Amino acid sequence: MTQTLYAQLANKLAEDIAMERYPVGSLLPTEQELCEQFGASRCTVRAAIKQLKDMGMVSSRKKVGTRVESTTASAGYRQKIATVEDLLQFDAAHLRLVKDVQDFVADIAFSSEMDCQPGTHWLRISGIRVNSHDKHPAAWTEVYIDPEHSEIRDAVMDAPEALVSQLIEARYGRSVAEIRQSIQAIQLSPELARELKTVAGLPAFRILRRYFDQNGKVFEMSLNIHPADRFTFSMKLTRENS
C-alpha cells in the first residue's frame, strides 16, 4: 500500500524543516503556494499541515500563517489510529534498520500469544524502526512472514522505507484486509534499552499484531515494543444506534 499524498507532503515538509530550509520561527509557504509547488489540492495540503501540527513541528494562526516551532517531532507525538490505512501510515512514517533475518519455528509460548499452531515455520525479521526525520529509535520490531513469501528477504533489506506488507502486496498481490492487535504494558529489558538508546526498566508498550488477507488468512504477524515516552495510541469510540 503506498503512502497517501498528504503523508508524502508532510514527510517532505518535515525533512525540509529538519534540514532548516525552513528555520524555527519562519513561516511555511501559504496553502496556495504549497498547492502550486507540489501540484496538490488544498485538502491534501491542509491534511499535511495538520500532521505536522500533531507532531509539534508547526503551529498556525489566522492572518499570520504556519510557523515552524521545532525541527523534530515532539516526544509526545500522538498518532490517531482508526483504520487499517491509519496504522499502515503510522508504520510508514518510520524507516526499518534490519538487525537479523532468520527462519523461526513457533514454540508453545509464541503460538499462544499469536494464536498460531506450534511448530509452524515463519521468516522472522528483527530490527529497529527509526523516525524518518531525525533517525531516533522509535521501536523494536519483529515481523513474522508466511514462509511461502520468504523470497522477499532481499527486498526487505534493499527497501528499508517500505512496509513488509507493501512488499508482499507488490510481489504476491496479497494485501491487508484486517489487522488484529493487543497492547500490553511492560518494562524494558537491558538488551532492548540498549537498542533503543534509553534506560532499562522504563515502561514500554508491547504490541502484537496479526495481519489478515482478503480471504481471512494470517500471512504476517509482528511484535513491536515502543518506549512509553515515544508512543501514544489514540482511538475514537462511537455508540451504535440501538
Image: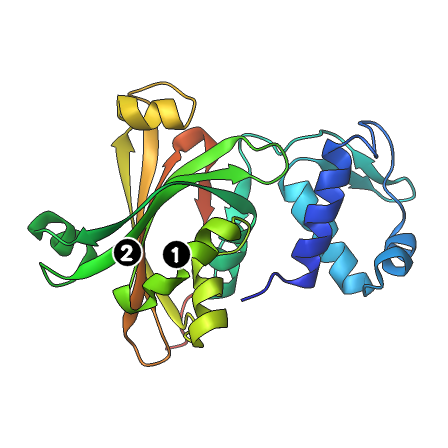
Residue 141, relative to residue 22: is it above or below? below
| Location of residue 101 in the rendering, given as x and y in whole percent from the top left corner | 33, 47
What is the number of the mark on residue 153? 1
Q: Residue at x 40, y 32 (%)?
A: 228
First of labels 2, 1 by sequence position: 2
For the residues labelled 2 and 1, the Cα–Cα distance comes to 8 Å
Kindly identify which residue carries mark 2.
123
For the image shown, how many numbered marks are present on the structure? 2
Residue 37 in which image quadrant: bottom right
In the displayed orientation, state which residue is furthest to the top: 199
At 46% from the left and 38% from the top, the residue drawn is 231
The secondary structure type at the circle numbered 2 is: strand
Amino acid at dot 1? Arg
Given residues 65 and 186, the one toward you in this image is 186
Residue 236 in sight in this render: no
Badges 2 and 1: C-beta atoms under 8 Å apart? yes
